[in-house]
């Protein structure tokens, strides 16, 4: 009997007030004065994963690591991979290359100091590596990252490169090579549809995620890359003022997320990114330096 495909379980470790929909609503200077719930929510996720024997990858915000290094140590000590979510949760395309370099280098240093292990992976806030910010891949290579998980191959009002490869591929950039691990989609009617988690996991019926991941594993024999945020299992979090669309995206079905996650852990096999990404040999085909084109493995 063929063993089940191992999918990547990934957590973007940030607090509820870090979310991009609150940019311009909550001044960054107020972050330190707001009630923090990231440690309690992340600890809850660690307990759930321990119950199910699952290890994953935690893309930790540097701002969180700087204030709560014990949380990073607890994540690492439980056998999970530590990766970077950048430092200040700024969208990549809203930064200059210099500011982005400082952000990702600062986060990497904080995470490596706290965990005592090398940080290889990066995921941008809100998947904000898009066609106009592909320069960020060069900076990731130059600052020591070996894989990125910031490109979502869908159409969205805030992010996405719909022509990008749907499965992990190598990107050749002027600075070197990088493995790109895009968020998971399923292909229907000539379109890439998201099955990767986050808001899609909360807003859509659980059956959509289950069907999409099962189709990806069975029909394409590919692993899925699923993501979630600690605040998504916290229906008791403070309600912040924002527009209707942002309220729906952020707060809808928070009370259902933990139960859905527990079911997902039972329905599929899970591991960290390092267990899912292949080791690409130098002679393998790569994407061009000017666009995120697919190299399917």
Image: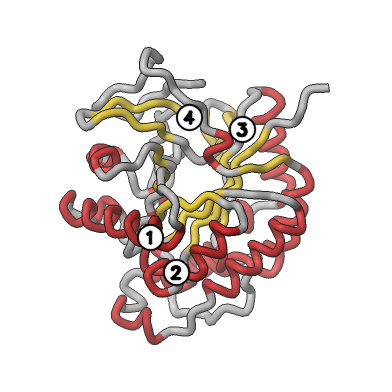
Q: Would you say residue 161 is visible in this rendering?
A: yes
Q: Which is more N-terminal, label 4 or label 2?
A: 2
Q: How dense is the environment of label 4, judged by Cα within 10 Å: few (below 14), some, or many (20 and up)?
A: many
Q: CA distance from mark 2 to mark 4?
A: 31 Å
What residue did someone put label 3 on?
A: 223
Query: In percent of the image, x 52 and y 54: which residue is there?
Result: 58
Read off the residue under disc 1: 113
The outermost residue toward the bottom is 33
Name the residue that disc number 2 marks. Answer: 69
Q: CA distance from mark 3 to mark 1?
A: 31 Å
Q: Vertical placement of 291 versus 243: above or below?
A: above
Q: Quadrant of residue 290?
A: top left
User: Element under label 4?
Assistant: loop
SS label for mark 2: helix
Eye-nearest disc, 3 or 2? 2
For label 3, the SS is loop
Residue 203 appearing in the image: no
- Label 2 close to label 1 by CB (< 8 Å): yes
Is 102 placed left or right of 243 in the picture? left
């Amino acid at each position: 009997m063929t063993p089940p495909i191992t999918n990547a379980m990934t957590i973007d470790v940030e607090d509820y007030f870090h979310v991009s929909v609150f940019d311009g609503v909550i001044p960054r200077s107020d972050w330190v004065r707001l009630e923090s719930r990231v440690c309690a929510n992340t600890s809850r996720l660690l307990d759930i994963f321990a119950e199910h024997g699952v290890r994953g990858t935690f893309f930790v915000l540097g701002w969180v690591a700087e204030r709560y290094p014990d949380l990073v140590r607890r994540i690492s000590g439980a056998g999970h991979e530590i990766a970077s979510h950048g430092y200040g949760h700024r969208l990549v395309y809203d930064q200059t290359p210099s500011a982005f370099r400082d952000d990702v280098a600062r986060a990497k240093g904080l995470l490596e100091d706290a965990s005592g292990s090398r940080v290889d992976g990066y995921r941008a806030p809100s998947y904000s590596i898009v066609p106009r910010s592909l320069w960020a891949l060069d900076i990731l290579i130059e600052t020591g990252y070996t894989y990125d998980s910031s490109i979502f191959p869908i159409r969205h009002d805030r992010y996405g490169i719909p022509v990008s490869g749907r499965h992990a591929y190598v990107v050749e950039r002027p600075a070197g090579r990088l493995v790109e691990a895009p968020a998971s989609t399923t292909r229907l009617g000539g379109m890439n549809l998201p099955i990767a988690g986050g808001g899609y996991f909360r807003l859509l019926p659980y059956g959509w995620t289950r069907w999409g991941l099962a189709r990806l594993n069975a029909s394409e024999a590919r692993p899925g890359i699923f993501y979630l945020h600690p605040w998504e299992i916290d229906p008791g979090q403070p309600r912040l003022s924002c527009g209707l669309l942002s309220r729906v995206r952020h707060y809808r079905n928070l009370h259902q997320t933990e139960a859905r996650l527990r079911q997902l852990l039972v329905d599929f096999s899970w591991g960290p990114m390092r267990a899912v990404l292949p080791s690409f040999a130098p002679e393998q085909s790569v994407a061009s330096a000017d666009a995120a084109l697919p190299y399917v493995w």
